[in-house]
Image: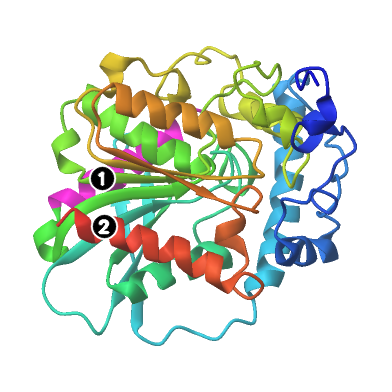
Amino acid sequence: MDINKNTSLLPGRLGNPDSTLRTDERADPRLVNALAPYELDVHPEKAPVDGNSSAADCITWSAEAEANYAGVFESIFVDLSPISNVESSEETITGIDGNEIKIYIHRPTNVQGKIPCLVHTHGGGMVILKAEDLNYERWRQELASRGLLVLGVEFRNGGGALGNHPFPAGLNDCASATRWAFKNRDELGVSSIIVSGESGGGNLCIATALKASRENWVNEISGIYAQCPYISGVYAGPPSNLPSLEENDDYFISNSMMAALVKVYDPLGENSLNPLAWPYHALKEDLAGLPPHVISVNELDPLRDEGLVYFRKLLSAGVPARGRTVLGNCHAGDCLFPKDLPDVYSSTINDIYGFCQSLI
């Protein structure tokens, strides 16, 4: 039998264009059931915009998408029991562009001495959602409860309520927060600075390291932990070397939606190959000398393969790097379902904590 001609053997929508998370046998049944109340276990309703739409239309749509996603996430996280061993506060700093940036600070109350500092850059394609959202607040508190000082950066977004600020505004804010943490490390009582984020936040944490390298302050960053990073920007015309973009298209997120977010982040398309906007395009010389990385991807995520490509680029450039695949899960699924997938949720949090501890 010629397996190259038998497409039914291929995974996901490569083998069956009608495949959904509900019908894909690789999916964790608990994930499918958690998504079902929002009708996200099947193909979501198509966004009215894509990579061919105008930037103005994509910006308008992004505000609507932000409200929809925020509503879903709030319903998941609204009634969780509070975490008792973490104290939270806020700080406002001035960024490199002269703008104010709110920093959410979460500190464990049961740990003595200096501890690692995790700078968290939230998801949303660098365009939507907020660090103050319940799901991100909970994520930071969970990490802090393990023994980390966690900083949540309320960076400027490309669209939505905190827009419209295209690239490089959000990246500049994340870099500003990272440098502030390093400058104030003694007052904060921290031993090291790690930058971590998921999806668009995965882009921003990786890009922060690349920016730091270009500007000769990369020694201020001890490590990068990127989850399901959104880093290629090629969603309007997925290339053949990233088969997961077709294999898992419309599994929770879609190429058309991601292409629209690209339009909002870089309206004129001037930065399509700029590694600071889209780290996937970084060259070996861009990566050499970066701090240790973890690249965590999810099996049923359209973005899986671009994360794996970046991981292998890091290794080729001599960067200490570890890859991780969360099986049975969609995009960011290990960050979103503490009640339905508690073991998966805790496993990722514990892995981040372990990485931070390894860098002391």
Residue closer to the observer: 145 or 182: 145
What mark, if any, has residue 223 been given in the picture?
Answer: 1
Outermost residue on the front side: it is: 1
Q: Quadrant of the N terminus?
A: top right
Q: Which residues are magenta?
A: 166-183
Q: Report the amino acid beneath label 1.
A: Gly
Q: Is residue 195 above or below residue 141?
A: above
C-alpha distance separating marks 2 and 1:
8 Å
Residue drawn at (27%, 50%) of the image: 194
Left or right: 17 as drawn, with respect to 204: right
Pointer 2 with pointer 1, Cβ within 8 A? yes
In the image, is residue 167 part of the stretch drawn in magenta?
yes
Q: Report the amino acid beneath label 2.
A: Cys
Residue closer to the observer: 327 or 270: 327
Q: Position of residue 296 (x, y in %)?
A: 46, 46
**Which residue is label 2 attached to?**
356
Which secondary structure dominates the residues rendered in magenta? Answer: helix
Left or right: 311 as drawn, with respect to 353: right
Left or right: 253 as drawn, with respect to 16: left
Q: Position of residue 190 (x, y in %)?
A: 16, 62
